[in-house]
Amino acid sequence: MLTINFHPFQNIETERLLLRRLNENDADEVLALRSNPETMKYIPRPLAKNREDALGHINMIEEKIVTNTGINWGITLKGEPKIIGIIGHYKVSPENHRAEIGYMSFPEVNGKGYMSEAIKAVVAYGFEQMNLHSIEAIIDPDNIGSERVLQKNGFVKEAHILENELWEGRFLDTVIYSLLKRNWKK
Ligand SMILES: CC(C)(COP(=O)(O)OP(=O)(O)OC[C@H]1O[C@@H](n2cnc3c(N)ncnc32)[C@H](O)[C@@H]1OP(=O)(O)O)[C@@H](O)C(=O)NCCC(=O)NCCS
């Protein structure tokens, strides 16, 4: 079994971004991200309705860090304190040395390569700091932007599962992308 230890918490710096720990001051941005039907279109989770929901999300993320069961960062542009998105290893499976990444950002900042840059850094953290063997992402087949950022980072499509998730009365397909450490090109 892989031992996961997120302490001390590491910020991650890339060319244009600083990935940092979320805190309660990020509640407004987290609410904006998680209450927006556009950003949540392909994420089958309830829309956040108020500040309490946003704080609950931040606390859930914090709890996972504290218990070494998952890690997420707020994505910021260097020199600007407010987050433009969230990314992380949402679910970790230490027995399989594997984790699932998830990510989201505001539509206004999409298409500038920020998420590709963030994924690259979070994948490197997963393989180098967490010592993962593989990383997966589970996406909606219609989420072309998400598919694209994964492909740009070397992930390969491994499965398209038909109607395996029941969400709001509809059975949704899911697509699984993954990357093995040995196929990772740093
Ligand atoms: C998916 C998402 C993270 C992409 O973020 P981003 O900052 O736009 O990503 P990048 O700029 O790094 O790259 C996006 C790529 O997808 C392409 N793309 C985006 N939407 C597209 C579409 N509808 N059709 C074709 N290509 C598309 C862009 O052209 C770009 O590719 P390129 O660099 O080859 O031109 C962002 O749109 C998002 O947060 N969406 C809402 C939340 C979400 O769905 N998260 C993923 C859940 S699994």
Image (cartoon, helix red, strand yellow):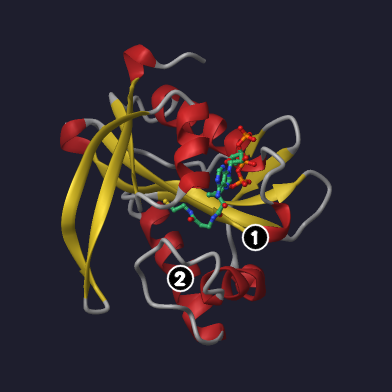
Given residues 92 and 182, the one toward you in this image is 182
Count neighbours of disc 2 (C-alpha within 10 A) and say few if under 14, some if 14 to 19, many if 20 or more: some
Q: The disc labelled 1 sits on which kind of residue?
A: Phe
Q: Quadrant of the N terminus?
A: top left
Q: Which residue is located at x 41 percent, y 31 percent?
A: 126
Above or below, 152 relative to 176: above
Q: Which residue is located at x 72 percent, y 59 percent?
A: 108
Distance from disc 1 to disc 2, alpha carbons, whole Å, reads 17 Å
Q: Is mark 1 within 8 Å of ligand 1?
A: yes
The answer to which quarter of the image holds residue 181 is: top left
Q: Which residue is mark 2?
A: 57
The answer to which quarter of the image holds residue 117 is: top right
Given residues 161 and 21, the one toward you in this image is 161
Where residue 21 sits in the image (x, y, percent)? 58, 53
Which mark lies nearer to you, 1 or 2? 1
Assess whether mark 2 and mark 1 are in contact (beta carbons under 8 angstroms).
no
Count neighbours of disc 1 (C-alpha within 10 A) and say few if under 14, some if 14 to 19, many if 20 or more: some
Q: The disc labelled 2 sits on which kind of residue?
A: His
Q: Which mark is residue 115?
A: none
Q: Which residue is located at x 42 percent, y 61 percent?
A: 42
Q: Which residue is located at x 43 percent, y 42 percent?
A: 6
Q: Which residue is mark 1?
A: 106
Given residues 6 and 36, the one toward you in this image is 36
The answer to which quarter of the image holds residue 46 is: bottom left
